[in-house]
């Protein structure tokens, strides 16, 4: 039987199926739906796959998420910090400098003032963009250091077309006020966010799943374009007219039978980060002073740490705190330690910055590895992505989601990419 087949039961694949009236079979390689929006439940704790919150302004997505949890969600203003050499300051750091070493504040202010004349100067890479918008000192000590920890590359390796509204560009007045007063300045692309009261972030997707035809434990191993046939690791085969794919571009290209060399080479040049999530449960309830924080010290492993039970009290047992630390790596910056060593070092790092005390009782510890985290926007990614998407589109394989479209999409944008694919195929939209 031929028809429209969907690969991947993450938020974009589910979004496509939902808006296509579920007139598609979804083939998912894992044993559960949700993709990187999955939530995991262990020993009374709930851990998402990295910090997930909803700050979408799209009415369709807001309605789906709210209905999925029967309107049972929390709406919170983000409390976010930065940690620099044992100093804690609010985020974003460039407008909350008070509390950092005096000499560093002076350098940041002087360099920011100098950068004012370069504000409108075209930037050829992310490093130039940072220097022209924040100055050399803020770039060196904060944004540049974080780029190496989060993106695993130097800032000049990246383009600027992914930035959009993700990084706030302050005025000189805001920077000065944040450097000389104790007034906390809120200037962030997230003003309010929502998070489910129970069930973790994944529960926001429940309405998408109801009625969906999901086939679990179906890992694609071959896509035969000539015969329009899909073959899976478990031996199942099916035919199709159209494929909607949310699986990463390098993965689907590896599966295509007799794939042109040019396309395979383009796929081999795409780069991305992976992340190791260190999950901890601690028998103490007064640990979380914020929702999440960023670490700039490159001697500390994690790039970002968050507290799941600060999002919902149901994410940890009463009297306990859940902690999740993110450690990024890539082929450009491989991990230099075993998983057990990463766990030990992360616990030690959290002690160094005052999150954990020596006598804390760690009730639970575990590691989860996510192979695909962020797309690395190197200077050739558009060309390579274009070659692949053009080839797939000509063969009626339409890509959706962060890894299918190979783009910096938040979860709501991924859902909407599935919705647009349904519109393209003439689905009856809900």
Image (cartoon, rainbow, N blue to C red):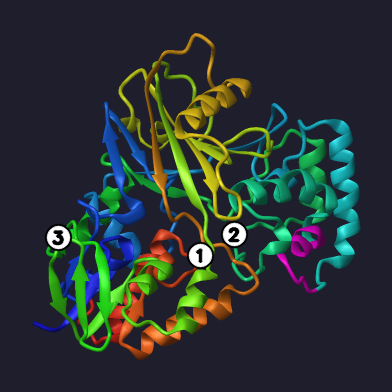
Could one spot residue 54 in this view of the protein? yes
Residue displayed at 34% across by 80% down: 398
| Viewer-closest of 407 and 230 | 230
Q: Secondary structure at mark 2?
A: loop
Query: Contact (CB < 8 A) between labels 2 and 1?
Result: yes
- Foreground tag (2 vs 1): 1
Residue displayed at 43% across by 65% down: 402
Q: Position of residue 40 (x, y in %)?
A: 29, 40
Q: Which residue is mark 2?
A: 166
Query: In terms of sequence position, does the residue under pointer 3 or pointer 1 come before the other?
Result: 3
Extreme residue in the top direction: 359
Q: Position of residue 244 (x, y in %)?
A: 29, 76
Q: Choose top left, top right, bottom left or bottom right for residue 219.
A: bottom left
Residue displayed at 27% across by 77% down: 223
Q: Which residue is mark 3?
A: 210
* Mark linked to residue 2: none
Whole-angstrom CA distance, mark 3 to mark 1, is 27 Å
Magenta: main secondary structure equals helix
Q: Would you say 127 lies left or right of 166 here?
A: right
Residue displayed at 60% across by 63% down: 165
Q: Residues within 10 Å of mark 3 (few under 14, many from 20)?
A: few
Q: Which residue is mark 1?
A: 408
Q: Residues within 10 Å of mark 1 (few under 14, many from 20)?
A: some
Query: Contact (CB < 8 A) between labels 2 and 3?
Result: no
Q: Secondary structure at mark 3?
A: loop
Q: Is residue 123 magenta?
A: yes
Q: Would you say 33 lies left or right of 367 here?
A: left
Q: Residues within 10 Å of mark 2 (few under 14, many from 20)?
A: few
Whole-angstrom CA distance, mark 2 to mark 1, is 10 Å
Q: Which residues are magenta?
A: 122-132
């Amino acid at each position: 039987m031929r028809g429209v087949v969907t690969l991947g039961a993450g938020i974009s694949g589910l979004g496509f199926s939902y808006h296509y009236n579920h007139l598609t079979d979804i083939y998912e390689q894992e044993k559960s739906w949700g993709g990187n929006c999955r939530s995991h439940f262990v020993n009374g704790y709930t851990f998402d796959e990295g910090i997930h919150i909803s700050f979408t302004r799209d009415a369709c997505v807001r309605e789906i998420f709210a209905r999925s949890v029967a309107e049972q969600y929390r709406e919170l203003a983000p409390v976010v910090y930065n940690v620099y050499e044992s100093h804690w300051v609010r985020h974003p750091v460039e407008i909350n400098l008070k509390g950092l070493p005096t000499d560093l504040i002076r350098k940041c202010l002087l360099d920011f003032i100098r950068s004012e004349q370069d504000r409108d100067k075209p930037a050829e890479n992310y490093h130039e963009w940072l220097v022209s918008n924040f100055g050399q000192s803020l770039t060196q000590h904060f944004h540049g250091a974080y780029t190496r920890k989060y993106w695993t590359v130097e800032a000049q390796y990246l383009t600027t077309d992914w930035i959009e509204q993700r990084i706030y560009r302050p005025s000189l007045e805001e920077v000065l006020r944040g450097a000389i007063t104790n007034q906390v300045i809120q200037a962030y692309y997230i003003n309010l966010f929502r998070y489910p009261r129970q069930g973790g972030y994944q529960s926001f997707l429940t309405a998408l799943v109801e009625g969906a035809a999901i086939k679990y434990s179906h890992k694609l191993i071959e896509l035969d374009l000539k015969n329009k046939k899909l073959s899976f690791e478990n031996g199942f085969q099916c035919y199709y007219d159209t494929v909607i794919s949310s699986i990463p571009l390098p993965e689907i290209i590896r599966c295509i039978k007799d794939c042109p060399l040019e396309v395979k080479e383009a796929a081999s040049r795409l780069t991305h980060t992976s992340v190791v999530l260190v999950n901890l449960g601690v028998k103490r309830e007064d640990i979380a002073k914020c929702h999440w924080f960023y670490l700039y010290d490159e001697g500390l492993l994690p790039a970002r740490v968050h507290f799941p039970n600060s999002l919902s009290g149901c994410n940890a047992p009463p009297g306990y705190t859940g902690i999740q630390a993110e450690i990024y790596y890539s082929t450009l910056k491989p991990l230099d330690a075993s998983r057990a060593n990463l766990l030990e070092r992360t616990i030690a790092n959290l002690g160094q910055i005052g999150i954990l005390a020596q006598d804390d009782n760690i009730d639970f510890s575990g590691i989860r590895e996510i192979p695909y985290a962020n797309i690395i926007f190197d200077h050739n990614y558009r060309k390579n992505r274009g070659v692949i998407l053009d080839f797939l589109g000509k063969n009626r394989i339409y890509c959706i989601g962060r890894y299918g479209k190979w783009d910096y999409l938040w979860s709501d944008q991924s859902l909407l990419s599935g919705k647009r694919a349904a519109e393209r195929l003439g689905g009856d939209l809900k």
